[in-house]
């Protein structure tokens, strides 16, 4: 196990995480199994749609292989062109259709890879954010189309949450450390994150030397869980009123990802504690 701390002279505030019994520690896949909430019926309704049929079908296409039903409904006394998220028939979130279109439906991953949309501009619609607990099995290009964008959007949402707070811990699994510098948008995002009081931990395989000048704790771990794990975990300081969040996903073939996210400080803290116990905390 190789753990490197690369930092500038800026002092880094360390968040104390609870100790974890490694013998009872859960792996990433076990966290997915625990956080996935399969006991509720989840659906998205386009209410009083004014969208062309092709645009409305894009939403259905995004979720057609997932455990989320999509329909179009007309409701008197309801606003037009909104999307409602329902659990067991009860509305739990609502967003403008245009916001969902602009954040997910009408974009591709290049928006974030190139840095066209910086972290400061990330504004994830509530009906996407509040799909927490829904287990997604998505495929990236070329095997799939839009599905992986859900996980990318939530990754950026959690990173943006951490940037806004500017303190606590952020743990991110990249599979390959080279992605941090090869993707311009990712590089800029982590430059901004490292320039705060956050304690930023990055995990992956490959040469860590290009990250030597960054205020990052680099975990160079050539093990299956790190090679196949995608996680973004924000844990606020213990005294903070900020809310923590975690995205956890795994792959067996680099094509299909099995993942879930949770917006819950206690759960995020447990994932971060596991990563620190398993791969080192400095």
Image (spheres, rainbow, N blue to C red):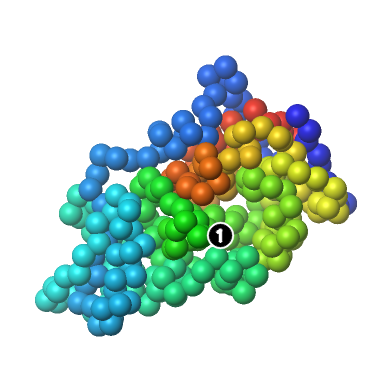
Check the image and name the residue furthest to the left: 76
Q: How far across and down, in percent of the image, does residue 230 sit?
A: 57, 45
Residue denoted by label 1:
156
Q: Secondary structure at mark 1?
A: helix
Residue depicted at 36% across the width and 47% down the height:
134
Q: How far across and down, in percent of the image, does residue 174 sit?
A: 64, 48
Depth check: give the residue in front, 73 or 105: 105
Residue 272 occupies quadrant: top right
Q: How far across and down, in percent of the image, does residue 156 sit?
A: 56, 59
Quadrant including the N terminus: top right
Depth check: give the residue in front, 218 or 7: 218
Residues packed near mark 1 inside 10 Å, few (<14), some (14 to 19) or many (20 plus): many
Quadrant including the C terminus: top right
Please state the total of marks drawn on the protein image: 1
Q: Look at the image and tell me whether residue 150 can be seen.
A: no
Residue 92 position (above or below residue 264) = below
Depth check: give the residue in front, 19 or 40: 40
Left or right, 6 with reference to 186? right
Residue depicted at 69% across the width and 62% down the height:
183
Residue 129 occupies quadrant: bottom left
Residue depicted at 29% across the width and 74% down the height:
56
Left or right, 221 with reference to 239? right
Residue 206 position (above or below residue 55) = above
Depth check: give the residue in front, 147 or 271: 147
Q: Look at the image and tell me whether residue 280 can be seen.
A: yes
Residue depicted at 33% across the width and 52% down the height:
66
Residue 145 occupies quadrant: bottom left
Check the image and name the residue furthest to the front: 142
């Amino acid at each position: 196990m190789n753990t490197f701390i690369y930092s500038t002279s800026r002092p880094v505030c360390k968040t104390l995480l609870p100790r974890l019994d490694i013998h009872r520690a859960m792996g990433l896949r076990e966290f997915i199994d625990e956080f996935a909430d399969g006991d509720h019926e989840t659906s998205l309704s386009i209410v009083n749609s004014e969208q062309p049929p092709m645009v409305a079908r894009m939403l259905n296409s995004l979720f057609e292989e997932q455990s989320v039903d999509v329909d179009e409904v007309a409701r008197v006394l309801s606003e037009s062109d909104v999307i409602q998220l329902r659990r067991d028939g009860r509305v739990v979130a609502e967003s403008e259709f245009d916001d969902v279109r602009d954040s997910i439906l009408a974009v591709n991953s290049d928006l974030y890879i190139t840095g066209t949309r910086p972290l400061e501009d990330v504004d994830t619609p509530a009906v996407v954010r509040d799909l927490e607990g829904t287990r997604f099995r998505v495929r990236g290009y070329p095997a799939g189309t839009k599905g992986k964008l859900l996980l990318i959007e939530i990754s950026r949402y959690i990173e943006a949450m951490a940037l806004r707070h500017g303190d606590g811990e952020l743990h991110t699994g990249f599979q390959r450390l080279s992605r941090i510098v090869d993707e311009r948008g990712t590089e800029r995002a982590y430059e901004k994150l490292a320039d705060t009081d956050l304690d930023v931990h990055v995990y992956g395989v490959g040469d860590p030397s290009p990250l030597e000048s960054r205020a990052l704790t680099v975990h160079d771990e050539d093990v299956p869980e790190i090679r196949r794990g995608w996680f973004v975990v924000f844990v606020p300081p213990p005294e903070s009123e900020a809310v923590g969040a975690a995205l956890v996903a795994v792959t067996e073939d680099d094509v299909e990802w099995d993942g879930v996210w949770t917006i819950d400080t206690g759960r995020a803290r447990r994932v971060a504690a596991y990563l620190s116990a398993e791969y080192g905390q400095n």
